[in-house]
Image (cartoon, rainbow, N blue to C red):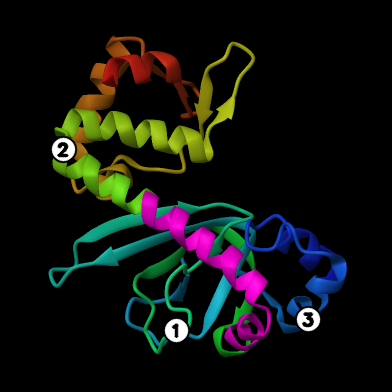
Amino acid sequence: MHSLSIQGLLQKVPLFKDLTDEEMKPIIELAQTRAYRKGTHIFMQGDPLTNVYFIHEGTIKIYKTDIHGKEQIVNILQPGQMFPHQGFFRQDDYPAHAEVSQDAVLIYIPIQKFETFLINHPEISVKLFRVLGDLIVDLQKRLGEQILHNTYEQIVMLLLRLTDSHGIETDDGKYKLKTNFTNRELANMIGSSRETISRTLTQLKKQNLITTQQSGDILIDKDALEDELF
């Protein structure tokens, strides 16, 4: 990939978007690219932490497994996002699995070299910590949803969260959510069952809060869904 393409992608990431061309040069020199096929793993939970990745194309599923092999989806990442968010300035392992959901092209930077760069550029470290802070707030919010809300409310909140992160606004003010997510994956995001997700989606359809299109995409009335929750 051409260095200008790498710079263009990296500057879409919150960590780098305010950097000048001159400030980006040493980062671009560290960056490498690689293509991954759908279904392959970039790393496994427990592997030594070696790289930080930036998505140029495709989608990446981040998930954990317990001792029984049960899957808990942490996030579905899109082009322009980075992962993992943990592990800087500490000897650590990857905290989750990273699987390619759609064919992907990734830019990656070796952690040790990146840490050295950040130590020498504290102003960029501050921006990184802001990104980490936003992630912590999101995780705390999701934990609160599981503790304070019933399953129906958790599913509504999940749809709203996915609408914010993956939805495409339509001409009539609704949002189209591409069905990259199976009912099993949606269930794994909140620790529920596929049957409960299916039952709740059917209920939401009957209330005209969501609509399934012929393409399989979900059309969401975000305002009505928020009213249903609050």
* 47 up-or-down from 132: above or below: below
Q: Nearest the camera: 134 or 28?
A: 134
* 72 up-or-down from 152: above or below: below
Residue 83 percent across, percent down from the top left: 51, 66
The amino acid type, in three-letter code, at marker 2 is Leu
CB under 8 Å between callouts 3 and 1? no
Residue 128 percent across, percent down from the top left: 56, 66
Q: Which residue is mark 2?
A: 148
Q: Which residues are magenta?
A: 114-137
Tell me, for residue 49, which label it has, or none.
1
Residue 78 in magenta stretch: no
Few, some or many residues within 10 Å of mark 3 (<14, 14–19, 20+) = few
Tell me, for residue 26, which label it has, or none.
3
SS category of the residue bearing label 3: helix
* 184 up-or-down from 136: above or below: above
Name the front one of labels 3 and 1: 3
**Left of 44 or right of it: where is 116?**
right
Which badge, 3 or 2, is on the more N-terminal residue?
3
The quadrant the N terminus occupies is bottom right
Name the front one of labels 2 and 1: 2
Residue 3 percent across, percent down from the top left: 84, 72
Residue 223 percent across, percent down from the top left: 43, 16
